[in-house]
Amino acid sequence: MPVSNFVETSLGMQLTSLHVENFKSLVNFDISFSKFSCLIGLNGSGKTTVLQFIDFLSQLSKGDIKGWLKTRQWTSSDLHSKLTSQRLIKFCATFLLEGSDKVQWEATFNPDLGRCTYERVSIDNLTLMLAEDKKLSLHSNSHKSVPPIHNFPIIFDYQGSVISQLGHDLLSNFHSALLRVKDFFLKTHSLELLSPAFLRRRSRNSEGGIGYGGEQMSAVLYGLGRSKRNEILAKLKTVYPYLQDIDVSQLQAGWKKLNVVEEYSSKKYSFESKHVNDGLLRLLAVFAQLKYDDGFVLFDEIENGINPELVEFVIDLLVESPHQVLASTHSPIVLNYLEDEIAIKGLVYIYKGKNGFTSSIPFFSIPSMHEKLSVMGPGDAYQDTSLVDLQQEIISIGAREASQ
């Protein structure tokens, strides 16, 4: 990703690309990202798997793989691909910092052990951290009177990444890029399972955001405080003019209850969350997460539960957010609300080959799609395309590149 294309995010860094080997259908898989990226493709192509893998990286940094598997009702054997005979999962995540610095985190994860057995973090090919064979090496750029390489035995147990057990002070003392990588994934939040039933629940804990299904939304809204809730209210009133208040109160034992206040014929009515429409709840969830924390936010099928006339409102919110955002959609309507420049950079077509492996390609790098964009909107171009013919064109592109 050229430096000139870098757009400042709230974290001051972006995830620009991933290489994944052997995670579910991601076998020798490569993908690039912009500040706002949107995955499109047929059902079962692997869009949700891409979101799940990024959430998996987040859990490696948090060091709670067992808890993550339990939440998803998965086992460790669900992680590696059934399409190969391999069990180890390998990846390389590439980030771009504010300037021209390129940071990479590459690792090998053993599902049977629940942890990475090899890890390397580098900046412009300089190794900052290397963990393998129960040994940890850290490179320092801040200690002038000691050798730049420090070696430590790994004598502690850990899940996921060894980074999860290294404190912020230690990481920042050696190189700020190590801390930036950890913080990036600590502040990655997946909302791929948003459910109206979960969004309506009373909750107590707001740690980690609103949760996969939105089950902690009332606690997050409560924790944001009145000022930020009023900011959300002001935005929502532009599309819900009868909305008067987002009222969150604390009950006994710390439970938080969400009520929405609306006004009709000069009279105000308070409705508990269980009586609030799905679209408003979903919009509240998006706002709550974006106000809760800086970071990288993942949404699956962003148009679900939202009226078509409100889709533009949601897309503008996500594109203009200081967060890095990755969403998926099946709706051409969503795509038509993207400016051409955003669509060219951010739309990624996800598809499966005959071997069952998931692949990706920037949608408007496909010649026929690039040509259509000159006379159509992004969504119209997508809707006007036979996906069968498109896949054949992609295969032809791959064959030509392989022969060169």
Image: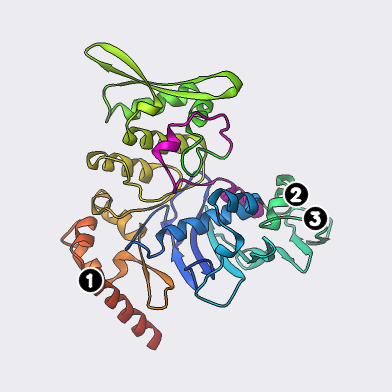
Mark 3 crowd level (few <14, some 14–19, many ≥20, 10 Å Cα): few
In terms of sequence position, does the residue under pointer 1 or pointer 2 come before the other?
2
Residue segment shown in magenta: 178-207
Where is mark 2, residue-wise? 170
Task: Choose mark 3 or mark 1, whichever is in front.
Answer: 3
In terms of sequence position, does the residue under pointer 2 or pointer 3 come before the other?
3
- Quadrant in which the C terminus appears: bottom left
Residue at image coords 40%, 85%: 402
Q: CA distance from mark 3 to mark 1?
A: 54 Å
Q: Nearer the viewer, residue 125 or 316?
A: 316
Where is mark 1, residue-wise? 368
Tell me if residue 308 is in the magenta stretch.
Answer: no
Tag 1: residue type? Ser
Q: CA distance from mark 1 to mark 2?
A: 51 Å
Tag 3: residue type? Phe
Say above or below: 232 vs 265: below
Image location of residue 207, percent across then percent down: 59, 36
